[in-house]
Image (cartoon, rainbow, N blue to C red):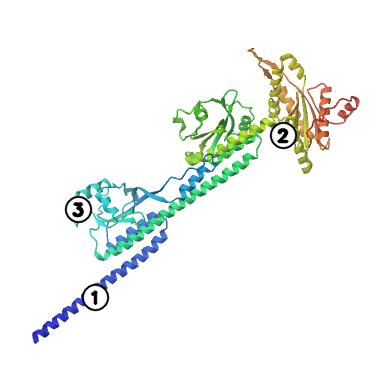
């Protein structure tokens, strides 16, 4: 009986001891879980605060593992990730102005996959950043296959030695064998099985109680890294999209501005200025194709002193010419393909001169309806930056608009300008005359008219021939244009007569302009090259000028033209080569010598 009671007491004691042991274990387990929960809760808040700071996320994860396991050495390697499209968008319709940008938008908005090139150590315990390593994984090595499984693994035994030769060799290839790390925790993205990162510790084993902690902390790390990557990609796409929208807005502004310009010189200046400003370039030029010589002629420049720019635009400055196929511009014109050179001095295409100061060049052809108009050169991007493919795409779009604008301006020029003298034809001059007179009436502004006639022009034709007469007319028109302002209007009235409207200029200003014209002609030598002769014939040409102003001398268009013509007649009667302002003397002459005034019946009706 006693033995039975003793055995029963022993069993009860053993059961009670086992119960206490289980309770102690459960209590210990509860304490560990509670400690881990508190630690994970703090980590969650810190990871959420890190947002896009991948380096900070890596440091938080490493510090947490170190604090939990007491590691002396630790590091985290984060994937260097880039976004790549999963498919290629369909091509946009040929000739669509916005096609390149629509394609860019598609590429940015379609779903992307993550492409990992390498893994960089963003944080290593007690190791400066300069000494941290970067490795490219070997996809079929034992070490990397273990990492891709997504489960923590140990590459060494309890002594810290590699367990197998494959581990040793594969870790040596990745330059990870000398770090003293042998417990590895992959950060595997469950959405695409991409290894976002890899944490290494100098511990050799884990306790079963810690597996849940590692799993939960790893899941938090993966979520934080994935969100950071996505946020960066989203921000990058947003910036790229904003940049493209800005460029589209600029293109729209350029197109609208260019379509409103009918003067070729102003058009050339604006095209070049817009193009240079869009890509932040310091200089540029437009070379137009001269049909007679089949050469590219520099017609407008940007980025040098204003006086030289104006002289080149007006044709008063001799510029360099390029044959088709010569230099970068010539080859672009020949191939009709754009060229981008960010170090042109090393290229055989570049024609180096003593004044060359080109660090980068973007050259595109100006083509419309398969006809070459010229080439657009943009040089020296600001801050020494290279031209990018984005720069090329935007300039190609500007070039398309510019080529069409130039083509339309050329057609307009053919319709409204005299083919010989390149000044307005009579009908268009009268149209501009009516517009300016209405504006002057509305704004109470002055408007002056110069009537100009070449002295003894018939003698030039009779002596040297009509070809020489044509040369004199064209050369005289160039001299007149050089002495006028951009807002002044010049037209060929008929034969050897020209008419000039001086906008917002009174009689005094008109006399100053007329004097400037006659002074320029006194200094100018007309050099005619007769066909078949080596020596040029030098001619001196003078003009007679009549001046009248609105509202001082006339109240309407017909009267203003008649008063200026009477003043011109007075100049010719007084011996030619002089300027006369309409006034009392002119009126007295017209009373004394009645003459058949100009026939105005063929005027356009306004």
In the visual, does 142 lie left or right of 469? left
**x, y (%) of residue 588?**
89, 28
Quarter of the image for residue 436 reads top right
**x, y (%) of residue 480?**
71, 27
**x, y (%) of residue 603?**
79, 32
Q: How many other residues sit within 10 Å of disc 2, few (<14), some (14-19) or many (≥20)? A: some
**Residue 23's disc number:** 1
Of pointers 1 and 2, the one earlier in the residue sequence? 1
Spatial separation of the CA atoms under disc 3 and disc 1: 38 Å
Under circle 1, the secondary element is helix
Under circle 2, the secondary element is loop
Q: Is residue 352 visible?
A: no
Q: Residue at x 57, y 24 (%)?
A: 294
**x, y (%) of residue 50?**
41, 58
Q: Residue at x 33, y 62 (%)?
A: 217
**Residue 488's disc number:** 2
Spatial separation of the CA atoms under disc 3 and disc 2: 92 Å
């Amino acid at each position: 009986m006693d033995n039975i009671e003793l055995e029963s007491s022993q069993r009860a004691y053993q059961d009670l001891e086992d119960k206490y042991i289980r309770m102690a274990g459960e209590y210990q387990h509860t304490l560990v879980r509670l400690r881990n929960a508190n630690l994970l809760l703090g980590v969650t808040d810190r990871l959420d605060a890190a947002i896009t700071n991948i380096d900070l996320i890596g440091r938080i994860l490493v510090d947490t593992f170190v604090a939990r396991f007491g590691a002396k050495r630790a590091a985290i390697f984060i994937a260097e990730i880039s976004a790549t499209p999963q498919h290629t968008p369909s091509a946009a319709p040929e000739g669509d102005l916005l096609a390149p940008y629509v394609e860019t938008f598609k590429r940015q908005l379609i779903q992307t996959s993550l492409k990992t090139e390498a893994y960089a150590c963003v944080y290593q315990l007690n190791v400066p950043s300069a000494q941290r390593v970067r490795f490219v994984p070997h996809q079929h090595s034992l070490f990397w296959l273990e990492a891709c499984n997504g489960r923590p693994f140990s590459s060494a035994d309890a002594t810290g030695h590699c367990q197998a030769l494959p581990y040793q060799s594969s870790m040596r290839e990745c330059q990870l064998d000398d770090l003293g790390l042998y417990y590895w925790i992959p950060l595997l993205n469950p959405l695409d099985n991409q290894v976002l990162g890899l944490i290494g510790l100098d511990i050799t084993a884990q306790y079963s109680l810690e597996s849940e902690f590692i799993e939960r902390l790893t899941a938090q790390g993966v979520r934080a890294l994935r969100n950071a990557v996505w946020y960066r990609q989203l921000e990058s796409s947003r910036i790229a999209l904003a940049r493209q929208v800005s460029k589209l807005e600029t293109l729209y502004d350029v197109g609208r501005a260019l379509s409103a310009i009918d003067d070729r010189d102003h058009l050339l200046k604006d095209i070049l200025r817009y193009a240079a400003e869009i890509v932040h370039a310091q200089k540029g030029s437009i070379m137009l194709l001269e049909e007679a010589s089949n050469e590219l002629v520099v017609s407008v420049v940007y980025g040098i002193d204003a006086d030289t720019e104006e002289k080149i635009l007006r044709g008063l400055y001799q510029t360099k010419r390029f044959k088709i196929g010569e230099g970068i511009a010539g080859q672009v014109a020949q191939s009709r393909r754009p060229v981008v050179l960010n170090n042109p001095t090393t290229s055989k295409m570049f024609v180096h001169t003593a004044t060359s100061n080109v660090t980068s060049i973007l050259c595109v052809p100006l083509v419309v309806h398969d006809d070459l108009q010229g080439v657009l050169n943009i040089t020296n991007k600001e801050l020494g930056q290279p031209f990018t493919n984005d720069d090329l795409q935007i300039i190609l779009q500007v070039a398309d608009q510019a080529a069409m604008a130039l083509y339309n301006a050329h057609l307009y020029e053919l319709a409204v300008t005299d083919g010989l003298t390149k000044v307005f034809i009579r009908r268009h001059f009268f149209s501009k005359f009516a517009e300016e007179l209405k504006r002057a009436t509305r704004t109470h502004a002055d408007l002056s008219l110069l009537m100009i006639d070449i002295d003894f022009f018939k003698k030039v034709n009779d002596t040297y021939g009509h070809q020489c007469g044509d040369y004199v007319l064209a050369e005289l028109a160039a001299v007149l244009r050089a002495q006028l302002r951009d807002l002044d209007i010049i037209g060929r009235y008929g034969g050897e007569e020209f008419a000039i409207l001086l906008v917002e200029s009174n009689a005094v200003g008109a006399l100053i302009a007329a004097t400037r014209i006659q002074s320029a002609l006194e200094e100018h030598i007309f050099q005619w090259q007769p066909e078949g002769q080596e020596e040029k014939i030098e001619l001196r040409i003078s003009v007679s000028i009549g001046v009248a102003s609105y509202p001082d001398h006339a109240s309407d268009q017909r009267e203003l033209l008649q008063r200026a013509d009477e003043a011109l007649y007075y100049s010719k009667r007084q011996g030619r080569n002089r300027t006369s302002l309409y006034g009392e003397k002119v009126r007295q002459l017209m009373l004394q010598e009645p003459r058949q005034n100009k026939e105005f019946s063929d005027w356009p009706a306004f």
